[in-house]
């Protein structure tokens, strides 16, 4: 069933930091942050102004690319909004991608200012060539060296209102880097208009009121929660390594502060459910959950629903750093679709497009498509590449010309740009989008093309399997691949002849996996650091190639 949600842009908001000013005027004594420290919207607005004056004094000006390497917390939110207020361009990189990947990213970025912890600034000692253009170096810590300045020394008691930089909707407002889980990390350009549209659509699509208490497990969405006027609890976890979270601490956050909403990757929801269900723990305050970053499987939704009230909605939107949200579906809708017990042989239903986003399916190709007239649109129920356009779709990547060529399609008639998601899917008769996996992960065999999600769903049904991954091993250097299924077993289980036979029989019983005869077992799959859910199939393919003769 097609949804129709209306959202409007606040006409009095130009600069994104105006949301802080607006919320401070509306409810000055309401907490913007509750944990790890409590700060009201009035105090937050004062801090943002003080930081803005301090950064201006330090010569951070409109357009200054400013790298931020600060953990989620009061400093992170205040300095980000202050940079937005003066018109600087905050740059967010996920350190979880690793030092080498970060070094590769920074070589093209050439930031002009760097704000980070003292530990983060040690990067400049190891990779001095990457920071040649950094003229302004600021630490949030107490220890400083060289020309490093302390953040607190920039802040004065100027009580005035810093005049927000007036933005054109097409101005570059920020750069957010992808996690690098589906290829090299790339800097996604966020325009002022794109950010504002995202803030407004997330509020209306997920029906977020201004009286919510939000559990923040991902910094970017924490920024949105503050713009929505919510009170935020910064989850007691290392957001760079979410797989190491202690469910006891997160559950304590939710219960102590009565959190009414939260964002969590499927991995986070699964860890909380595994711990809570065994101990019959309930989370009665939660009314709204948003989970994204990877497909959310039915078993996770069914488990988490046992912990929350019956009227609590779990949203599983689909999107990417370049475009979020693209589609949305709730757990109740999704479980209804799969109520007949079917698996994901037709992919995973990821819902209807979030209006006014436009979603199409085009023929699969790895080649650039320069103009829209050259794209071949596919009919309903045919699998192809997902392409999107809309007001919160990024216009491009920062200094990544080749990536833009491969991912952007120009419509010369409308002067609009379509973004190729790099994902495969289909649109059904009800207008719903179904996800089949990454385009780069498809396996072309001598007989057919295999897609990851449908194939893996066959083997994931085995009760001893945590997850599986379809990879292709090259044959004679051609594009034709030999399909291999990699299996990660649940703790305590080991590959036996009986188990291998059961998996082979499962594969043989389904048409889509009938031709797969190679099964490998790996204790742990390589996964992305941000959501700990996206499998690095490229790495698995290299590993598998060494074991398949």
Image (cartoon, grey):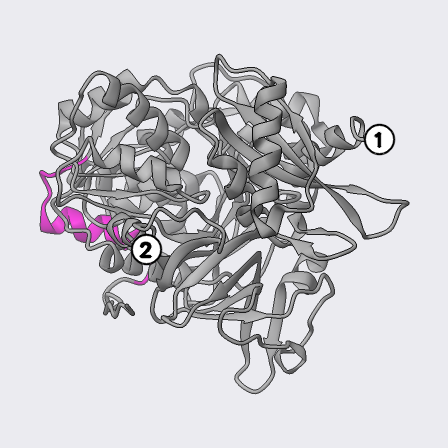
- Residue sitting at 78 percent across and 47 percent down? 481
Q: Is residue 10 above or below residue 141?
A: below
Image quadrant occupied by the C terminus: top right
Which residue does the numbered mark 2 point to in the structure image?
Answer: 337
Q: Is residue 17 magenta?
A: yes
Q: Quadrant of the N terminus?
A: bottom left
Q: Position of residue 415 (x, y in %)?
A: 55, 81
Residue 204 visible in the snapshot? yes
Which residue is pictured at 19% across the width and 43% down the height?
230
Looking at the image, how many numbered discs can be counted on the residues?
A: 2
Q: Judge whether residue 37 can be spotted in this image.
A: no
- Residue 368 is labelled as none
Q: Nearer the viewer, residue 445 or 511?
A: 511
Measured as percent of width and height from the top left, residue 56 is found at: 42, 44
Q: On the image, which quarter does residue 376 sit in? A: bottom right
Residue sitting at the far right? 476
Looking at the rendering, which quadrant does residue 226 occupy? top left
Range covered by the magenta-colored residues: 14-32
Rendered residue at 66%/65% (across/down): 364
Q: CA distance from mark 1 to mark 2?
A: 41 Å
Q: Secondary structure at mark 2?
A: helix
Q: Residue at (26%, 67%) from the top-left corner? A: 3
Q: Is residue 313 left or right of residue 322?
A: left
Relative to 89, 221 lies left or right: left
Q: Nearer the viewer, residue 489 or 212?
A: 489
Estimate the x, y position of residue 343 in percent, counting from the top left: 43, 46
What residue does disc 1 label?
549
Q: Residues within 10 Å of mark 2 (few under 14, many from 20)?
A: few
433 to 479, vertically: above or below: below
- The mark nearer the N terminus, 1 or 2, is 2
**Label 1 Cα neighbours within 10 Å, binned few <14 / some 14-19 / many ≥20:** few
Q: x, y (%) of residue 72?
A: 37, 30
């Amino acid at each position: 069933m097609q949804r129709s949600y209306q959202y409007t842009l606040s006409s009095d908001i130009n600069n994104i930091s105006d949301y802080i000013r607006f919320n401070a005027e509306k409810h000055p004594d309401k907490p913007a942050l509750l944990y790890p420290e409590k700060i009201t919207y009035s105090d937050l607005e004062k801090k943002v102004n003080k930081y803005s004056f301090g950064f201006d004094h330090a010569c951070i000006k409109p357009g200054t690319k400013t790298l931020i390497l600060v953990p989620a917390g009061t400093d992170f939110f205040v300095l980000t909004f202050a940079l937005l207020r003066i018109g600087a361009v905050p740059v967010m990189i996920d350190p979880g991608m690793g030092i080498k990947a970060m070094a590769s990213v920074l070589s093209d970025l050439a930031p002009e200012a760097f704000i980070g912890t003292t530990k983060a600034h040690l990067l400049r000692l190891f990779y001095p060539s990457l920071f040649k253009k950094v003229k302004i170096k600021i630490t949030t810590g107490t220890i400083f060296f060289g020309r490093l300045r302390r953040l607190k020394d920039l802040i004065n008691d100027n009580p005035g209102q810093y005049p927000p930089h007036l933005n054109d909707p097409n101005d570059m407002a920020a750069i957010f880097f992808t996690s690098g889980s589906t290829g090299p990390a790339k800097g996604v350009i966020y325009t002022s208009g794109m950010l504002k549209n995202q803030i407004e659509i997330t509020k209306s699509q997920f029906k977020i009121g201004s009286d919510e208490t939000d559990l923040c497990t991902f910094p970017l969405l924490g920024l949105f929660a503050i713009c929505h006027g919510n009170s935020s609890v910064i989850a007691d976890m290392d957001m760079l390594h979410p797989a190491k979270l202690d469910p006891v601490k997160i559950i304590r956050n939710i219960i102590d502060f009565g959190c009414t909403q939260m964002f969590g990757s499927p991995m986070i929801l699964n860890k909380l459910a595994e711990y809570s269900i065994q101990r019959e723990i309930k989370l009665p305050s939660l009314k709204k959950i948003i989970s994204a970053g990877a497909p959310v499987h039915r078993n996770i939704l069914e488990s988490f629903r046992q912990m929350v009230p019956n009227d609590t909605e779990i949203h599983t939107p689909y999107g990417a750093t370049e475009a979020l949200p693209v589609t949305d579906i709730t757990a109740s809708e999704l479980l209804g679709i799969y109520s007949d017990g079917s698996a994901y042989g037709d992919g995973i239903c990821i819902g209807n497009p979030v209006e006014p986003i436009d979603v199409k399916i085009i023929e699969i190709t790895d080649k650039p498509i320069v103009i829209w007239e050259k794209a071949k649109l596919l009919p309903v129920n045919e699998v192809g590449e997902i392409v999107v356009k809309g007001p919160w779709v990024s216009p491009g990547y920062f200094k990544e010309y080749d990536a833009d060529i491969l991912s952007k399609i120009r419509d010369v008639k409308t002067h609009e740009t379509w973004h190729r998601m790099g994902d495969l899917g289909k649109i059904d008769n009800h207008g719903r989008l179904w996800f089949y996996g990454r385009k780069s992960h498809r396996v072309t065999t001598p007989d057919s093309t295999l897609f990851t999600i449908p194939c893996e769903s066959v083997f994931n049904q085995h009760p001893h399997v945590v997850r599986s991954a379809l990879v292709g091993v090259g044959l004679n250097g051609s594009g034709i691949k030999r399909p291999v299924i990699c299996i990660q077993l649940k703790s305590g289980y080991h590959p036996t002849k009986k188990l291998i036979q059961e998996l082979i029989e499962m594969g043989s019983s389904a048409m889509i996996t009938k031709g797969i005869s190679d099964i490998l077992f790996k204790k742990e799959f390589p996964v992305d650091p941000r959501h700990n859910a996206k499998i690095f199939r490229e790495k698995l393919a290299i590993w598998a190639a060494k074991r398949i003769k």
